[in-house]
Image (tube, rainbow, N blue to C red):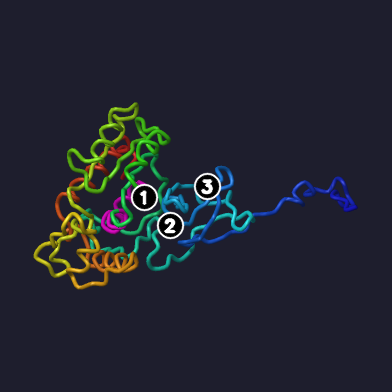
Amino acid sequence: MTDRYGSDVLAPGWQKAAKPSSTETPLEVGLVVEDVKSGFCGAVTRWENGLVVLEDRRGKTRSFPVGPGFWIDGKPVSLVTPQRVRTGQHAMGTAAGQKHSGRTASGSVSTGPQKAKVALPSRIYVEGRHDAELVEKVWGDDLRHVGVVVEFLGGIDDLPAIVQEFAPEQGRRLGVLVDHLVPGSKESRIADEVHRGDHGDFVMITGHPFIDIWQAVKPQRIGLKEWPAIPRNEDWKGGTCRRLGWPAESQADTAKAWQTILGRVGSWTDLERPLLTEVERLIDFVTQDHLDTLE
């Protein structure tokens, strides 16, 4: 029989001898980890403000503090921020393509590289992966400056449950950017339901009028006078790709098309005014209780 106390019962450290230690593991997009406390398991999508965002196989996302408290393949790990951020990954203070020409991509005055800030309790949710990527590219520097974390909203149907769990209140506001929010739509009915709820005063739900976020990019940026008109019985993204002469047979084709479009966006001047207005309103809304703490 193994003596778990060793030869000296008074020697320190025997209590931890059988406990596995956590291995420091650099964050990496696509890394699958499990949060020990909640049991939530998902792939790393991004990290910022000391938080890591995980997405499970159903598309649901949750944020957790970077550090210990995770499992990988049944072994405890402590997630750490990489010293160097590779192209395409986004970490607080190291946005891909960040420029220091005096202005950020959104047109704000740039203050240059800054130390990471503690995330504000308030959050912004953005419906649609392409929408979230566009917001990150244009407003990422601004959001990092004020410490606002952006969460990916897989679908508007999930919003009532998210609001109930988040429980917005004074100093803990929730802003939501919804895809194609127009009067009489399902999206507008759900938004009205949330606003009538217990937390409605501290939730702002807004959206853009475009059929798809692609239309928020000025068509001239991809050599068009205007975006093509696609019949309602035809998938909009696929129809657009076909009319542009781009492959449209798979989701990978659509994803490649979007990356081409996103690559043509350098700043706010490449976007249509309706999107600019609504994103700026959301940022103002979620930070209004924290103005005295922001530089």
- Which mark, by number, is residue 40? 3
Where is residue 238 drawn, in percent x and y?
Answer: 24, 63
Q: Nearer the viewer, mark 3 or mark 2?
A: 3
Q: Which residue is mark 2?
A: 45
Q: Are marks 3 and 1 in contact (CB under 8 Å)?
A: no
Q: Amino acid at mark 3?
A: Phe
Q: Which residue is mark 1?
A: 152
Where is residue 61 drawn, in percent x and y?
Answer: 43, 49
- Which mark, by number, is residue 228? none
Spot the residue most to the left: 225
Q: Residue at x 16, y 49 (%)?
A: 274
Query: Image height check: is 65 above or below 205?
Result: below
Please report whichever mark, 3 or 1, sits nearer to the chain's N-terminal start: 3
Start and end of the magenta stretch? 132-151
Please report whichever mark, 3 or 2, sits nearer to the chain's N-terminal start: 3
Q: Amino acid at mark 1?
A: Phe
Give the side of residue 67 with respect to residue 231, left or right: right
For mark 3, give the secondary structure.
loop
